[in-house]
Image (spheres, grey):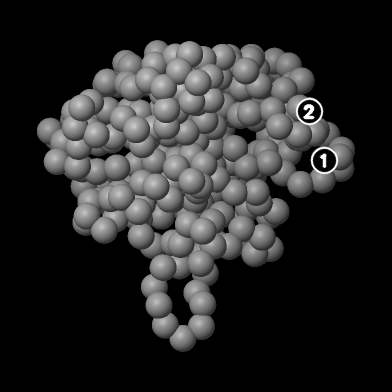
Amino acid sequence: MDKGVLSVVSNEQIAERIFRMEVEGELAGRMTRPGQFVHVKCGAGIDPLLRRPISICNVDTDKKRLTMIYRVEGHGTRVLSEYVPGQPLDILGPLGEGFPVEGRQAGEHALLVGGGIGVPPLYYLGKQLKQCGVRITSVIGFGTASQVFLERELAELGDVHVVTIDGTAGVQGLVTDVLTGEYGLGMSDWDVLYSCGPLPMLRALQDKYQPAGKEGYISLEQRMGCGVGACLACVCPVQEKGEGRKYRKICSDGPVFPLGEVRLS
């Protein structure tokens, strides 16, 4: 973990309430593990006081450039959306445990499942998996067509299935609706699952694939205070049974966990 001040290269809206920011600096060159996140200070003063956790969407280690995609939801991200090129941005990172890529073999088939703002970290992951010779299929879900993003970029890595709740783009329904043999995505059609998105989606995936013994990894979205495991604001219970209840800290033990390790309640 390091702290640095990076310079904003670009900051543009790419979908409904979705912004893509690119920053550059020495710190970006050390962000090599997909699935990790950065803790961003939004603004120069004490308002907002807390940093905002944002996933790593892509890194160009040669140019030392980091790409983040975030959704404007509150005061902090609204301030962040007003940053302009050349403006300094205070960043803490990279933080947390990312997606495991080591050991993947050429010819394997990885299924990437993302929902909403959980889609961005899957892009950096997909790029690294493709370098290992892994075949990639992505399933990305959104509420409506105006919220869809990264479809074109993920299509450069492999097959992409877009799902929207209202059916205005791609398949109508939820991402779990396309994970059937009809779309070539039955349990026997892929070797490993990587997923990030809203809790109900992750719970459905874990309930379906963990009992079947499928290898998979899920990344949890969570509000955080410190981002380094000190404040205990982002704990979640583990699945294992025993005396007393055990917990994992999403910011430092995660945000990525193997299927079945944590209780998604």
The answer to whether residue 187 is visible is yes
Nearest the viewer among 23 and 220 is 220
Q: Residues within 10 Å of mark 2 (few under 14, many from 20)?
A: some
Q: Residue furthest bottom?
A: 243
SS class, disc 2 = helix
Residue located 82% across and 45% down the image: 49
Whether residue 186 is situated above or below residue 145 in the rendered picture:
below
User: On the rendered structure, is 103 left or right of 36?
Assistant: left
Task: Name the residue tied to disc 2.
Answer: 79
Q: Residues within 10 Å of mark 1 (few under 14, many from 20)?
A: some
Q: Which of the numbered marks, if any, corresponds to residue 32?
A: none
Where residue 174 appears, as percent x and y from the top left, is 42, 32
Q: Amino acid at mark 2?
A: Val
Residue located 76% across and 47% down the image: 50
Whether residue 63 is situated above or below residue 258 in the rendered picture:
above
The answer to whether residue 120 is visible is no
Residue located 76% across and 20% down the image: 82
User: Label 2, label 1: how many angstroms apart (C-alpha)?
Assistant: 9 Å
Where residue 165 appears, as percent x and y from the top left, is 48, 25
Nearest the viewer among 38 and 76 is 76
Where residue 53 appears, as percent x and y from the top left, is 63, 42
Whether residue 164 is situated above or below residue 262 in the rendered picture:
above
Q: Toward which corner of the image does residue 99 lie, by quadrant?
A: top left
Asked if labels 1 and 2 touch by Cβ distance under 8 angstroms, the answer is: yes
Q: Which of the numbered marks, if any, corresponds to residue 48?
A: 1
Nearest the viewer among 64 and 221 is 221
Whether residue 133 is situated above or below residue 83 in the rendered picture:
below
Nearest the viewer among 38 and 28 is 38
Q: Amino acid at mark 1?
A: Pro
- Earlier-in-chain disc, 2 versus 1: 1
Where residue 24 appears, as percent x and y from the top left, is 58, 25
Q: Toward which corner of the image does residue 130 lie, by quadrant?
A: top left
